[in-house]
Image: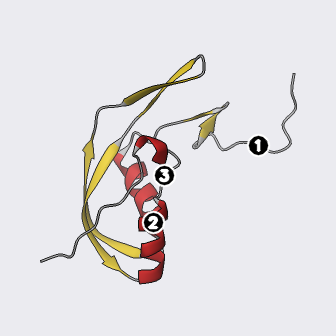
């Protein structure tokens, strides 16, 4: 039996797999946390998408994806530019966590 040096957060990971955020409140909280300091969320609509299936070596997996559509108010332009350049998700290789923004109006 392997010992753990620090406890794992059950909300984020289970063993070695990430646990998807399935509740709308959790998804909204995730978006707010990722955009904190760069932009304030004024309104957001959540649109579930088809899961993405993949294979890594001999293990199969899937990603639960969602699209956010809404209005952000820029608070710190430099931080927002960094988010646009780097994305906000650990699954960027699958096209997740990439931001598309445009001026309102």
The kind of secondary structure element at disc 2 is helix
Mark-to-mark CA distance, 1 and 2: 32 Å
Which x, y percent locates residue 58? 60, 16
The kind of secondary structure element at disc 1 is loop
Left or right, residue 17 beside residue 35: right
Mark-to-mark CA distance, 1 and 3: 23 Å
**Relative to 17, residue 57 above or below:** above
Which x, y percent locates residue 101? 28, 67
Mark-to-mark CA distance, 3 and 2: 12 Å
* Res 53 → quadrant: top left
Q: Residue at x 30, y 62 (%)?
A: 100
Residue tagged 2: 85
Q: Quadrant of the N terminus?
A: top right
**Relative to 84, residue 88 above or below:** above
Q: Residue at x 26, y 61 (%)?
A: 44
**Relative to 96, residue 73 above or below:** below
Left or right, residue 99 beside residue 47: right
Q: Residue at x 39, y 50 (%)?
A: 27
Q: Residues within 10 Å of mark 1 (few under 14, many from 20)?
A: few
Marker disc for residue 89: 3
Ranked by sequence position, the earlier of labels 1 and 3 is: 1
The mark lying in front, picked from 1 and 3, is 3
Q: Residue at x 48, y 71 (%)?
A: 82
Ranked by sequence position, the earlier of labels 1 and 2 is: 1
User: Is residue 76 visible in this depiction of the protein?
Assistant: no
The mark lying in front, picked from 3 and 2, is 2
User: Is residue 74 visible in this depiction of the protein?
Assistant: yes
Marker disc for residue 7: 1
Taking depth in this image into account, of 33 and 50 the one nearest to the observer is 50
Taking depth in this image into account, of 26 and 16 the one nearest to the observer is 16
Q: Quadrant of the C terminus?
A: bottom left
Visual colour scheme: secondary structure
């Amino acid at each position: 039996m392997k010992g753990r040096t620090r406890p794992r957060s059950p909300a984020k990971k289970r063993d070695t797999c990430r646990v998807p955020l399935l509740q709308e409140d959790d998804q909204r909280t995730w978006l707010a946390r990722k955009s904190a300091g760069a932009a304030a969320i004024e309104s957001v609509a959540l649109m579930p998408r088809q899961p993405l299936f993949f294979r890594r070596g001999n293990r199969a997996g899937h990603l639960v994806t969602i699209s956010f559509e809404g209005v952000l108010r820029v608070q710190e332009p430099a931080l927002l530019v960094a988010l646009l350049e780097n994305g906000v998700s650990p699954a960027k290789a699958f096209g997740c966590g990439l931001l598309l923004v445009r001026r309102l109006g």
